[in-house]
Amino acid sequence: MIVRGVDVKSSVTETADVCIIGSGAAGAVIAWEMAEGGHKVVLLEKGGYHPKEDFDQKEEDMIPMLYKNAGLQFTIPTGIAVAQGSCVGGSTVVNDAVCFRAPDAVLGWWADQHKVENIGPDAMKKHYETVEKRISVSLVQPYELNKNNLVLKRGAEKLGWASAPNSRNCKTCRQCGLCQIGCSYGTKQSMLETYIPEAQAMQGDLVKLYADAEAVSIVRSGSRATAVRATITGKEGRAYGLNVKAKLVIVSGGTIASSALLLQSGLDVNGQVGKGVAIHPSPAMVGDFPEEINGNQGIPMAYHCHEFSVLTTGKRGYMLEAIFMAPYQFSLPLPGFEYEHKELMSRYNHYALIGSLLQDESVGTVSLGGPLGTILEYQLTPGDSKLMADGMKSAARVLFAAGATKVITSHRKTTVLYGEDDLHIIDERGVSPGAMSIGSGHPQGGNRMGGAGQNSVVDSYSKVHGFDNLFVCDASVFPTSLGVNPQLTVMALATRLAEHIEENWRG
Amino acid sequence: MIFWSYSSLLYINAIYFPWPLPRWFGGTDWMLNSGLPLGLARSATSDALAVLVFATYPVWFYLGTELGLAGHRLATSQRLKERDRIIRELVSTTFPEGGAIPPGAGQVGTAQVVESLLTKIPPMFDDALTVLLFVFDSRFFVLAFTGKWKRFVDLEGGNGLGSEKQRYLDAWQSNSFLLSAAQILRITVSYGYYTRPPVYKLVDYSGPMIPDLPPWYDPGPGGAHP
């Protein structure tokens, strides 16, 4: 049963076995798993419920509808735009359906340095397999690569760099190129098309999902979380109280919202909540080609180059990923304004775009305050800046190798490279958020997983230290930056947690 | 009572006030220096003054509430009118008529789209954006960046590069202290321009296709892949 804010006419009290906050990659998976085990679940989602019939393929309508704060969320003081979904299904509704398992090296760091138990590739394999099957993960086929993706493939192959097509959670993709504003055809196997409707279809009405419901605080009694207090926003913005009494509480709102909820509930038990945040900052490099690339026609993210990624090197690095967007989102990394920006945008169909996803150090923090109620403070470390510069240069080399006549960097001051001899300009202009427009879609950390004394908030199975029945499960539990697109790992961790809870369920 | 208690706890440095910029060193510093480099420190005199000021809190609270509400009631419609004027000037400066994509922001309804966006975001953020627009428009900032005691909306505009308005906008975009604020303005304005059909059609973007399939859809050999 899905209850929207407009359906509510008065304050509500619910009693459930499990209350889950957030219906994205983690929350939806856990809700289904718990219901499968016969437990009654109440799932709270701050965003609205919008089935695919609501998706009209217009950026103007979809961005305010599906993104947190209409996409206007930034790091302080660096001004990096951090995009997150805010709707039933969370970011899985607006992501590019890219699926990677966690790199073995990263899982090794989590086990060795952060003392997370049973997290190695072998232990995680069954959880990945479970999720991959349920969301129909498959490898992009050669005929599905559009010219934008083929630019990355061609360039990487010319340079002899390791590269491969992506795996995606999509069935019979219609290649419309609009994954980031909701899949109108319903082929992307987001939570909206898989776990949520499947949970709803279960007999016994075990999962009750409240949309437009923002968790405000978790009520504590000793070492137990006893209830979740929320507000549900109804017609004309009227807010009603929603009180959920539950045996288990699982927070799955993502790095920013989960950290904020623990902080505002006074549950920063060891001073670590909100610490250790990474965001995968990803500068865009735009290659200008003589021929039409038509990057918006086809799957936006279907190919990657992992030559310099932790996947290949076993060390922190960066991944080059082909990506494309509809005009508004595409315009954001392009420099300048007025006539200059128009001139640059007029070449939209001749551009190929490569993003360089940086596996950054976890130095950001989430705290309470500011007009949005939360503040994400974030800076690049000197090591991050160096890696980011390397990533930008590698992206430019790929674009030139594939035939670009010039490459536009995302520096605020228009910076155009005309060949590899110009790569030094990137260093001269400086690589910092102050000098560039940088985007991010993968906030991680904030409630890190780890052994006691490891600067962690939750233990190896996502249970908050000092609590018997309070869990956090989403990307906020990552002890370090993942280095690859995170949705699959979030879902696998959710499956792992559900199994752990089920095995230890005492009612 | 809450205000009293909170202020007192801040003053004695028992709690910290989270705030993004600039960074205070603690509650005492926040109460005494408000983030400005005044260098004030606690002393017997400051303690006495604090007691005096705290004792008069109810008066300030009453006056602030009454005057603030009166001002709010009087100024809401005027404030919105002024805000919309700032938005119109800002979008017209950012995307003037002419150039490689000829329609200007004024011709494609950019300002209306931005105003509509403000109704779709959380009210607190809407308020913050409105404040940001007024700060952007304020004589103080215009003076700081251009040396002219004028509001942004009163600066010389026109379609020429290098106009006063354009130079002021450029100054915001390149100032490291105003990074986040400038980014918010830029993204908001771009949203109102590039999402408009007359604009995106000029860059050969097809726009919505549903309920049809994309013309370029390739089902692959033997039909759609599994």
Image: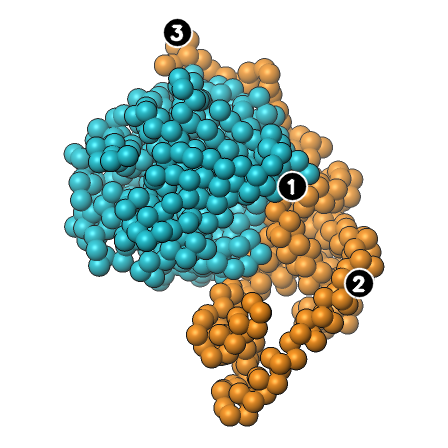
Chain colours: A cyan, B orange
Residue drawn at x 59%, y 87% is: B49
Mark 3–mark 1 contact, CB under 8 Å?
no
User: What type is the residue that disc 3 sits on?
Assistant: Gly
As measured in the structure, the alpha-carbon distance from the residue carrying label 3 to the one carrying label 1 is 53 Å
> Picture coordinates of residue A26 (x, y %)?
37, 36
Residue drawn at x 76%, y 62% is: B69
Residue drawn at x 40%, y 19% is: A204
Mark 2–mark 1 contact, CB under 8 Å?
no
**10 Å crowding of disc 1: few (<14), some (14-19), many (20+):** some
The quarter of the picture where the C terminus of chain A appears is: top left
The residue identified by callout 3 is: B222
In the rendered view, would you say A329 is above or below B74?
above
> Picture coordinates of residue A128 (x, y %)?
26, 30
Q: Chain of mark 2?
A: B
> Picture coordinates of residue A187 (x, y %)?
46, 20
Q: Which mark is residue B29?
A: none
As measured in the structure, the alpha-carbon distance from the residue carrying label 2 to the one carrying label 1 is 25 Å
Q: Secondary structure at mark 2?
A: helix
**10 Å crowding of disc 3: few (<14), some (14-19), many (20+):** few
Q: Earlier in the sequence, mark 3 or mark 2?
A: 2
Q: Secondary structure at mark 1?
A: loop
Most extreme residue toward the bottom is: B44
Q: Quadrant of residue B158?
A: bottom right
Q: Chain of mark 3?
A: B
User: What type is the residue that disc 2 sits on?
Assistant: Ala
Residue drawn at x 63%, y 63% is: B171
Front residue of A352 and A9: A9
Q: Which mark is residue B70?
A: 2
User: What type is the residue that disc 1 sits on?
Assistant: Arg
> Picture coordinates of residue B131 (x, y %)?
68, 59
On the question of residue B217 being in view, the answer is: yes
The residue identified by callout 1 is: A238
